[in-house]
Amino acid sequence: MLSLLSSSLNQAVQKLLGRTVTDVTLREYLRDIQRALIKADVDVNLVLNLTESIKKSAFNPPPGVTRKDHILYLTYKELVKLLGEKPVHPTLKRDSTVFLLVGIQGSGKTTTVAKLANFYKNKNYKVGVVCADTYRPAAYEQLKQLLKNIDIPVWWEKGKSSIELASSGVKKLKEEGFNIILIDTAGRHRDESTLMSEMKLIHDSVNPDNTILVVDGTIGQEARRQAE
Ligand SMILES: Nc1nc2c(ncn2[C@@H]2O[C@H](COP(=O)(O)OP(=O)(O)O)[C@@H](O)[C@H]2O)c(=O)[nH]1
Ligand SMILES: [Mg+2]
């Protein structure tokens, strides 16, 4: 999908470069950009805002800059803005940092826990994982399997609720001097409101330093609904 987007944006730019910039060619260029973004499942309102911003100052380049270069600069600037200008870094505390991973079933939480565990282990942090997924019997086994080669312990106890697991696990790992504590949660519930209230209870009982929503990268605009 991304390669299709980049080639259609590139085509729009190439077409503009081959022409003189007039009202007509600008309109056509903006329409090409809109089409490319909408095809890539970008929200229509975001697309309209983006092209409106380009249009607004397209014919007012700073001295010494051609219209064409200015339009390309505006396009670049607006696309960067759309994607988020600055990366967000997690809060890391000196002694121990707790990460809570949430998201629906199958979105990749457990896999992301293993990736983060590996990442921080390689940076020489003492990493521990808490399995608070009580819905899937194999959740604990899956974590152990993913983490055994990098020698990271997984906290889990039979018969405990996810909230008890999360809070006792974090407490125990903190006492044992773990610097990075990752909590894996379940995403399968009877309905959305039970999932939300359980996540809220876990969140309130462990008070994590970072809460990460894991979303399947291929679901497009549905991601927004999940985040909300
Ligand atoms: N292609 C791909 N598959 C992934 C990725 N992350 C997870 N998966 C797969 O998606 C499925 C669900 O992942 P899992 O981590 O168990 O999701 P969870 O239910 O949220 O814990 C598994 O089969 C994973 O191997 C990824 O980044 N890319
Ligand atoms: Mg899982």
Image (cartoon, helix red, strand yellow):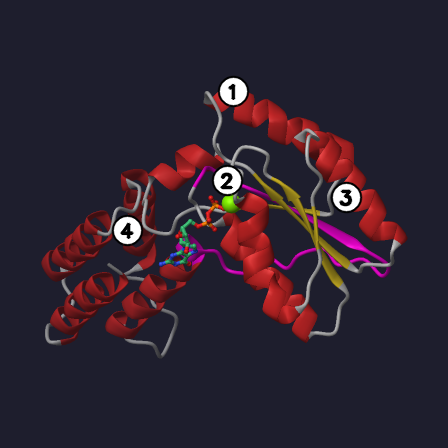
Q: Which mark is residue 76?
A: none
User: The residue under label 2 is which amino acid type?
Assistant: Gly
What residue sits right under mark 3 in the picture?
Answer: 169
**In the picture, residue 8 is in which quadrant?**
bottom left
Q: Is residue 81 left or right of residue 86?
A: left
Is the CB–ligand 1 distance for label 2 below 8 Å?
yes
What residue sits right under mark 2 in the picture?
Answer: 103
User: The residue under label 3 is which amino acid type?
Assistant: Gly
Magenta residue check for 36: no
Q: Residues within 10 Å of mark 3 (few under 14, many from 20)?
A: many
Residue 5, compared with residue 43, is above or below; it is below
Q: Determine the CA span between mark 1 and mark 3.
A: 25 Å
What residue sits right under mark 4 in the picture?
Answer: 51
Q: Secondary structure at mark 1?
A: helix
What residue sits right under mark 1 in the picture?
Answer: 193
Closer-to-camera residue (51/85) = 85
Which of marks 4 and 1 precedes in the sequence? 4
